[in-house]
Amino acid sequence: MNRIKEVLEVKGISQTELANKLGKTFNMVNLYATNKVQPPIPVLYQIADILDVDVRELLVSNKQITNSK
């Protein structure tokens, strides 16, 4: 799971703007942001660079997922 949508909101960047900077469609970025599709690792790093955050800020800890089940 990722926190792309949350970080976009904090940074004040729209999914459309991120899609344009990534060279991806809005639909693909929306799938990433809603956790329906996880971005490949290289794309995750691109997103982190665009949002000027550490890539780890875009991820949800696997321990949080395991503990919530």
Image: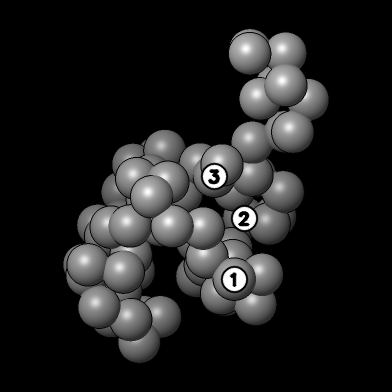
- Residue 44, image quadrant: bottom right
Q: Is residue 49 visible?
A: no
Q: Residue lying furthest top in this view?
A: 68
Q: Residue 69's x, y, as percent?
A: 63, 13
| Alpha-carbon span between mark 2 and mark 1 | 17 Å
Q: Residue 62's x, y, as percent?
A: 74, 33
To which residue does mark 2 refer?
A: 53
The secondary structure type at the circle numbered 2 is loop
Q: Nearer the viewer, residue 11 or 47?
A: 47
Q: Nearer the viewer, residue 66 or 9?
A: 66
Identify residue type, mark 3: Asn
| Alpha-carbon span between mark 3 and mark 2 | 13 Å
The secondary structure type at the circle numbered 3 is loop
| Alpha-carbon span between mark 1 and mark 3 | 12 Å
Instruction: Using a 10 Å C-alpha cutoff, classify the residue at mark 1 as few (fewer than 14 neighbours), some (14 to 19) or many (20 or more).
Output: few
Earlier-in-chain disc, 1 versus 3: 3
Earlier-in-chain disc, 3 versus 2: 3
Q: Residue at x 40, y 80 (%)?
A: 22
Answer above or below: position of 1 versus 42.
above
Q: Nearer the viewer, mark 3 or mark 2?
A: 3
The secondary structure type at the circle numbered 1 is loop
Q: Residue at x 22, y 70 (%)?
A: 26
Identify residue type, mark 2: Val
To which residue does mark 3 refer?
A: 2
Q: Are marks 2 and 1 in contact (CB under 8 Å)?
A: no
To which residue does mark 1 refer?
A: 40
Instruction: Using a 10 Å C-alpha cutoff, classify the residue at mark 2 as few (fewer than 14 neighbours), some (14 to 19) or many (20 or more).
Output: some
Identify residue type, mark 1: Pro
Q: Are marks 1 and 3 in contact (CB under 8 Å)?
A: no
Q: Are marks 3 and 2 in contact (CB under 8 Å)?
A: no
